[in-house]
Image: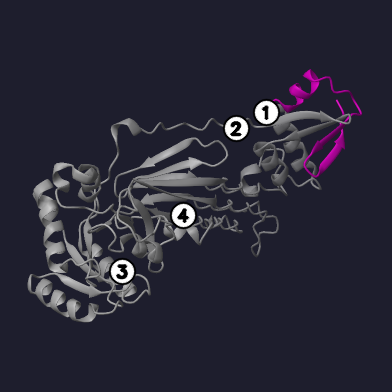
Amino acid sequence: MFVDTAKIYIKAGKGGNGAVSFHREKYVPAGGPDGGDGGRGGDVIFEVDSGMSTLMDFRYKKIYKAQNGEDGKGSKAFGKDGEDLIIKIPPGTVIKDAATNQVLADMVEPGQQFVAARGGKGGWGNVHFTTPTRQAPKFAKSGEPGEEREIIIELKLLADVGLVGFPNVGKSTILSVVSEAKPKVANYHFTTINPNLGVVNLGEGNSFVLADIPGLIEGAHTGIGLGHEFLKHVERTRILIHVVDVSGIEGRDPVADFDTINKELKEYNPELAEKPQIVAANKIDLSGAEELFKNFKKVIEERGYKVFGISAATNKGIRDLMLYTSSKLKELPPPPIYVPQEEKVKIYKVEEEAPFTIRVENDTYIIEGKWIQKVVGSTNFEDIESLQYFQRALKRKGVINELEKMGIQEGDTVKIYDLEFDYVR
């Protein structure tokens, strides 16, 4: 199994500000307040796309922001809501909070959605603040900021494509030149004893997972040469690239090698022999390989297989092979999601943050928190009614009580972000 991971920053849209506006119309000299509300900020939403199989796209784009809500307008016109940002992810993706490493969602079903960051609410226009004693409020509420956080996305997946063939035919070399995987490569049998996996990236939105399956030998289906362990990995792939050494450098017949491997696949599980196969005739750059390749290609293509002549050592024919493989994957149904029973994912609920915190530094009472930040942003400190609204909000939420419990005295300094003032009872 291959674990693909990425860390990204997401930010939901800010809510639009409420408008301060008064009705103006001919013959109506003293129209009332008519400021509209701001629009809601867009959410950041993850959505499962069954057509994706890797997280390659997240290696290049790290910041995702939803649209802000529009500010309110006069005549009680509301601002437009910001558009939600939909981030597509493959099935089997686990979403974690980077700060706590807690699992927020386990995304499995096609079309499943998870709201990872909610947009801020739009601010109220001044029309909401009219009272019998306040006929012309000159303040409105600012829009709330959208949620933001760093997210870790992990994809536990199986290879889309498996490289099969005899030992030392060049499978590991192919994997190393088409992906960032670093398999051990050497000119002796059984260099690879565990499957190596890498992501093949052919451009934005076009990638797949390729596995270098350890070399099979005759009798593998009976367990010879760790055959059962190797063949289990082949079962979970969607397409096989059958790599054959056509140079004849070890004195073997390429056609006989091809038949031997297919016989082992069929003996282990008849369904393996029915998997789509693309044939990669490797080492065509070596002396004497050209004639052997022509004969091999003629025989194998008459059996209905697509054959590519390649040289993994010089990259010849490799890109064409990968592009063709990608096109064939798109014709197949989505891969099944493999979730081992012992890997059940625990989903954590994120507890709501406290509305404010108070600490004392150098005889200054410092008040912080998302709620208090919203209130400060919504207050027009030049307007006496808005200032009174701010004071009532602090009292109603318990800020004043908490300050008095902590022993604040008249004249002590209180700081709320950029706002600083002396405490008066």
Distance Cα–Cα, label 4 vs label 2: 23 Å
* Of the image marks 3 and 2, the number of the one nearer the N terminus: 3
Tell me the amino acid under the disc marked 2.
Glu
* Of the image marks 1 and 4, the number of the one nearer the N terminus: 4
Which element carries disc 4, helix, strand or loop? loop
Quickly name the residue at label 1: 397
Tell me the amino acid under the disc marked 4.
Asp
Which element carries disc 2, helix, strand or loop? loop
Viewer-side label of 1, 2: 2
Left or right relative to 270: residue 225: right
For residue 418: magenta? yes
**Figure quadrant of the N terminus:** top left
Quickly name the residue at label 3: 322
Distance Cα–Cα, label 3 vs label 2: 49 Å
**Splitting the image into 4 quarters, where does residue 290 fall?**
bottom left
Quickly name the residue at label 2: 353
Q: What range is drawn magenta here?
A: 396-425
* Of the image marks 1 and 3, the number of the one nearer the N terminus: 3
Q: Are marks 1 and 4 in contact (CB under 8 Å)?
A: no
* Of the image marks 3 and 4, the number of the one nearer the N terminus: 4
Residue drawn at x 80%, y 21% as measured from the top left: 404
Per the rendering, the mark at residue 84 is 4
Left or right relative to 271: residue 238: right
Residue drawn at x 11%, y 61% as measured from the top left: 259
Which element carries disc 3, helix, strand or loop? helix
Distance Cα–Cα, label 1 vs label 3: 62 Å
Tell me the amino acid under the disc marked 1.
Lys
Viewer-side label of 4, 2: 2
Q: Are marks 3 and 4 in contact (CB under 8 Å)?
A: no
**Splitting the image into 4 quarters, where does residue 210 fall?**
bottom left
Viewer-side label of 1, 4: 4
